[in-house]
Image: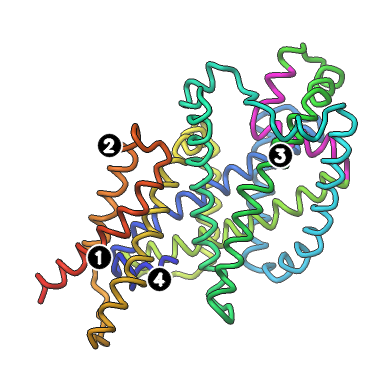
Amino acid sequence: SSFTSRAHGFGVRGSAVLALVFGFMIIGFLAVENALLYKGFLFYLGLPDTVGSRIIIYGILTIAWILLTAYGFNLVAKVSSIALIGFLLVLLYMIIDVIATSGQSWSSVLSFGAQLPPEALKSMGADTDAGKFAFAVNVLIGSAGALALVDADLGRYARKSSDIGIAALLGNVAMDIVMLAVGGMVMYAGMGQIVEYHVTVGHLTHEAAQALALQSPDSIAAAFIIFGGIIGTILMIFAQSKAQVLNTYSASLSLTSLFDALFSWRPGRLLFVILANLIACVMLVGSILDWFNSFLTVLGVLTTCFAGIMIADYFIVKRIQRSRGETDLDVPNINWAGIITLIVAFVLAHYVLNTYISIEFFTSLPICIILYPILRFATMKKAA
């Protein structure tokens, strides 16, 4: 996707902007998933959260992702296909079992309200129904945009471009609709069992157990271990392993594109595989990961802008150029039309119009598609 952005929207050096933003996002996801696995191991093994535990567990995870990405990609692909089926079966069992034992009806687990305290919702601007919906969409659009760009990288050898579109659609539906609904149902219906587990096994007070059950990623890992048992734990590790290998692979592609665009430096993929994992470890220090989570809305707007600009260049600008008989389409060093469009669309969506249109990609996407062709043809005329 970074190389595609060179020819469509940003230019050779201008594509470094996409590589930087996308790389930061994917490495952030790599760090978040590492934190989820770390919390899962602590919960399952009953270990305290100490510096020693962090060094050992994060160290093992980091080495595993580097080796699997560099030398075991085919193995991961084969094993994950089998593990995915098992994961879905365990997930289906968990849903049915949790809802049946909770005494809740299917209608109640599909229509429950927000579980966070009112003050937490207010701090996120999600204290109304519209605010909750906008907050959820703004957060999810970042991962949706990232997944679409990852699909472009992983699907570049597909037989037909439509296959990539189908994969992107199914992936986003599974991630942002199906898994979101499943996670909400399990956490809502199973909240009583999770709280009871923390009170009985962890010897916490009811209030402390309830607060712990609402924390993420602690609650996610705990729920899967409590309801899925040993099989669920193993399958969770397999599923996360595949995700982490893909995150490492995509992050290394972005770092490769970044250093190639800025410095024409191509030391090899292995170095960037290692570098991506080291940066992910740094993000786990202090409150950097919390800052990344708060930055997801911004990243969502930016990835939407990237996609909109590339779509406008490919489907509008390039088609008009070809209809005029222009076949020698040079790639600029920096496509200022794309850079300016990115800045304008982001500022308008995130800072100017956000009070009127709270779902920010509703603003950024049409601005990019309309503004970019105008600026691109204007800059080409000036250059001519």
Q: Which residue is mark 2?
A: 352
Which range is magenta?
209-230
Q: CA distance from mark 3 to mark 2?
A: 34 Å
Give the residue at x 54% y 60%: 273
Q: Which residue is mark 1?
A: 373
Q: CA distance from mark 1 to mark 4?
A: 17 Å
Q: Position of residue 59 (x, y in %)?
A: 65, 46
Q: Amino acid at mark 4?
A: Thr
Q: Which residue is mark 3?
A: 183
Quadrant in the rendering for residue 319: bottom left
Give the residue at x 62% y 54%: 173
Q: CA distance from mark 1 to mark 2?
A: 22 Å
In the rendered structure, does residue 92 fall within the stretch colored magenta?
Answer: no
Give the residue at x 84% y 34%: 99
Above-or-below relation of 81 to 276 = below
Q: Quadrant of the N terminus?
A: bottom left
Sequence-wise first label, 4 or 3: 4
Q: Are marks 3 and 2 in contact (CB under 8 Å)?
A: no
Sequence-wise first label, 3 or 1: 3
